Image (cartoon, rainbow, N blue to C red):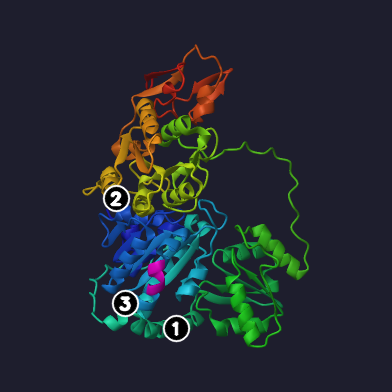
Amino acid sequence: MANPLLGDTPGDTHLLLGNEAIVRGAVEAGIQVVSCYPGTPSSEVPDTFYRLSPEGKYYFEYSVNEKVALEVAGGATLGGALSLCTMKHVGVNVAADPLMTLCYVGAPGGLVLLSADDPGCHSSQNEQDNRIYARIAGMPVLEPATAQEAKDMTRDGLRLSKKHGAPLLLRTTTRVNHLRGPVEFGPAPAPGKAEGFKRNPSLYVPIPAFSRPMHVRLMERIEALREEAENSPYNKVTGSGELGIVCSGISRAYVADALDNAGLADKVAILELGFPYPLPENKCLDFLKSVKTVLVVEELEPVVENDLRVLAQKNGLSVEIKGKDVLPRNGEFTVTLVENAIRAELGEAPVPTCECSLPELPGRPPNLCAGCPHRGTYYAARKVFGDDAVYSSDIGCYTLGLLPPLQTADFLLCMGSSISAGGGLAKASGQTVVAFIGDSTFFHSGLTGVANAVFNTHDVLIVILDNRTTAMTGHQPNPGVDRTVIGDNDHPLDIESAVRGLGVTEIRTVNPFNQKKTLAALEELKELSGVRVLIAKEPCPLYTRRVYKKVAPQVAYVAESCTGRFECLDKLACPAMYKEDGKAAVNPILCNGCMLCLQVCGHIKAKKRGS
C-alpha cells in the first residue's frame, strides 16, 4: 500500500509535520528531482523523500554539500525537470555561488530552494535571515505559517517557478518545520517526463556579453512576479482600525494568537504577507494609506519593515512605521511578546508577568551519547596533548566535545573549517593544532582543506571521526557509508584512500574504543610534523542498532571494590554513569557496551547484557 504522502487522494486530511507537508506539496506539484544536504530544521524533508524513494516517482539524492545539491537541482531544471533543493539556512552560504548565477540563468523546468532558517539558534551557529539572500539574488519568496500553507506554498511555488522560469525561495523557520497541523490533500498526478535541455548558449552560458541581458531579464521576471504577489491569496488584508499590523512568515501565527488572547482583533487592520517578495507595492500602499500607524511584526531582520519605509517615503506618506524599535532583532518571538507590543500601540495595559515560584529544572548540558566513539577519541587526545594543543572543531555531533572533561573544541567557524582554520592558526602562531572533523563533514568540505594543507605545508594533525553516518541530523548516508536504512551503499568511498590520494603519507586508522592502539597512534603522530591524519573508525551506536541491527552483548557495571573517587565520571562524563550511595554506578539500559570505562578504571567490569 502506497504511503499516504504519495497517494492521489484529494480531500483527505492528515496530521503532518511541517516538513512532511512540504513533501506532500512537492508531490502534488509533480516533483521530478530532489537534492539536498541534510541540516536541522530541514532534515525531515529529504529524509521523508529518501524513505519514500523506493515507491516514489522522482529522483532523490543526498548530495555531498549544499553547493553540489543546488548545482544538481540547477542542472535538472535546465533539463526540464521540476526540481526541489533543500538545506538549512547556513547551507545557503555554501550554495550562494551557484545561486546568484542560477537566478540569471533561470529555471526552465521550475526550481524551489527550501531555506530552513533558525531564529533562536536551536541547532545552528547563527540566526541569519535568508530573506536577504532572496533580495540579493532576485528570487521570489514564499513564507508559510501553518502546515497547510507549507504544503500549498510548496506546490504553488514549484508551479510559479516553472511558469516564470525563476528559481523561488521557500523560506521556513524552525517553528514551521517542526509544527504539526491538519493538512487537506489536493490531487497528486503522476509527474511527466522531463522536457530535456534546449540548447541556447545566450540564455544559459553567463559570459559577460550574455550576463548583461540576463540581468535585464531577471529584473523583468521580478516585475512579472510582483503582479503575481499583488493577486496572491497568500497576501491578504483583514480587519480595520487606525493601527495596522503587517506580518510575514510564522509571525502571522503569533499575531493571530496574540489578538485572540487579548480580544483586540476588532481594533486593528492586518496585512499578512505570505508572498512578501517581490513586494506587492500596490496592496501595501493601499494598506499604508488606510491606517495611521503600522507595526511590522517579523522575526530577525527588518526586511519587510525597510521595504515599507522605502515605499512610504517614495510616495510621500506620513504614516508612522514601527518595527525593530519596539520588537527585538534577534531570537524567536513569543505570543506574549507580540501581544504586549500590540497592546502598547493601542494604549492597553501589558500582560502581567507570571510571578509563580516554581523550582528551576535541573540543567542538562549537551553531551555525547553513551557509547559514542567520539568520547574515546577525545579522551585519548586529551591524555596525549592535554592543554598543550589547540583543538580546532567542526560542525557535527563531535562539537559536543566542547565541555569538561573532554574540552576538545577551542574554536569553530563552519562546516569543514577545522582543517583550514586549524592550519592557518598553526602557521600564524606556531602552536600545536589538532583538527577534528566528522566523516560526513569531511566529504562535505574537508577534502579541499586537506588539499590546501598539503599544498601549503601546514603543520596540523587532522583527526577524522568516522562513525559511518551523518549522525547529528538523523543518520543520513554520506559517500563513505557501507549501509543505509534502505539498503547497502554500492559505491562507498574510502576515507584513507581519499586522504592518501590528496598527498598525505602519515595516516593511522584505529578503533577509538581500543585505547592502547589509539594512544599509541596519537603519540606517534605527535612526534611528526606536517599534515598527518588519524582516522578514528567506529559506527555510531544508535546507527548500529538501527541499521546493522546489532547490540553489544555486554554492559559495564561497577564492582564492589569501587573507592568512590569518581574518576570514571570525571574523565569520561558518560551519561550511562551516575553516583549512588557514595560510589559510581552504571545504568544498564543506557549502557551501549563500548567498554571504554573499563580501560579508564579498574573497578569497572563487564557482564552479559540482561544478566
* Whole-number angstrom distance, CA of label 1 to CA of label 3: 16 Å
Q: Are marks 1 and 3 in contact (CB under 8 Å)?
A: no
Q: Secondary structure at mark 3?
A: loop
Crowd rating for badge 1 (residues with CA inside 10 Å; few <14, some 14–19, many 20+): some
At 34% from the left edge and 73% from the top edge, which residue is drawn? Answer: 110
Outermost residue, bottom direction? 315
* Whole-number angstrom distance, CA of label 1 to CA of label 2: 43 Å
Percent position (x, y) of residue 300?
A: 59, 63
Q: Is residue 47 something one can see in this rendering?
A: no
Asked whether 301 falls inside the magenta stretch, the response is: no
Which residue carries the number 3 mark? 108
The part of the chain drawn in magenta is 97-101
At 28% from the left edge and 71% from the top edge, which residue is drawn? Answer: 81
Which residue carries the number 1 mark? 219
* Whole-number angstrom distance, CA of label 2 to CA of label 3: 38 Å
Crowd rating for badge 2 (residues with CA inside 10 Å; few <14, some 14–19, many 20+): some
As rendered, which of 104 and 560 lies closer to the eye?
Answer: 104
> Mark 2 belongs to which amino acid?
Leu
Which residue carries the number 2 mark? 502
Side (left or right) of 561 relative to 288: left
Indicate whether 382 appears above or below 564.
Answer: below
> Mark 1 belongs to which amino acid?
Met
At 29% from the left edge and 48% from the top edge, which residue is drawn? Answer: 503
